[in-house]
Amino acid sequence: MGEMRKDREGEEQDNPELFKTEIDYHRYWKDQYEKEHKLRQEAETESILVKGIGMNSPEMRAMKTKLSETQVVLNGTKKIVEDGFRKIQEMQKELDRVKKENNDSFNRIAELCEVNERHQEINGKLQVHLTELEEENKKMHDHLNKQVENARKSGM
C-alpha cells in the first residue's frame, strides 16, 4: 500500500488535473465539515439560550401566569359543570316524581269519572222511580180527596 501511495504521489505531481481534482475534493469536504460544525454550534447555543434564558424570560413567566389563571378558570368551570349536572339529576328526580304524581292523578280522575257515571246512572234510575212514585202518590192523593169529597157529599 505504501508503494501505491508513492505511485499516486508521483502521478498527482505528473498530472496537474488529477492534483486539482484531489484538492477540490478535499475543499468540498472541508467546506461541508465547517458548515455542519457551524450549524451544530448554533444549535448548541440556541439550546443553551432556551434552557437558561427561556425558562426565566418575561414571556415564559407570563405564559406560566396565564397557565395558572387558565387552570383556576378550568377548575371553576369544572365545578360549575358538576353543580349543573347535580342540579339536572335532582330536577330529573323531581320531574319523575311529578310525572308519577300526575299519572296517579289522571288514574284517580278516571276512577272518579267511572264512579260518577255509575252515580249518574243510579241517580237517573232513582229520578225515574221518584217520578213514578210522585205520580202514584198524586193519583192516590186525588183518589183519597175524591173519596173524602164523596163521603162529605154523602153526609159522612
Image (cartoon, rainbow, N blue to C red):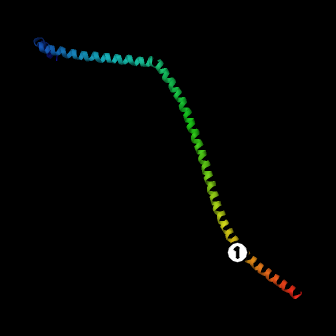
Query: What percent of the width, then of the height, locates residue 49?
Result: 41, 17
Residue 143 to residue 59: above or below: below
Query: What percent of the width, then of the height, locates residue 3?
Result: 14, 15
Answer yes or no: is residue 2 visible.
Answer: no
Indicate the quadrant containing the C terminus: top left, top right, bottom left or bottom right: bottom right
What's the residue at 87%, 88% (across, down)?
Answer: 154
Indicate the quadrant containing the N terminus: top left, top right, bottom left or bottom right: top left
Q: Is residue 65 found left or right of 113 in the rendered image?
A: left
Viewer-proximal residue, 1 or 70?
A: 70
What's under tag 1, amino acid-wise? Val
Give residue 127's quadrant in the image: bottom right
Furthest residue toward left: 14
Give residue 47's quadrant in the image: top left
Furthest residue toward bottom: 154
Give the residue pinned by disc 1. Answer: 128
Residue 153 to residue 28: above or below: below
What's the residue at 38%, 18% (across, down)?
Answer: 46
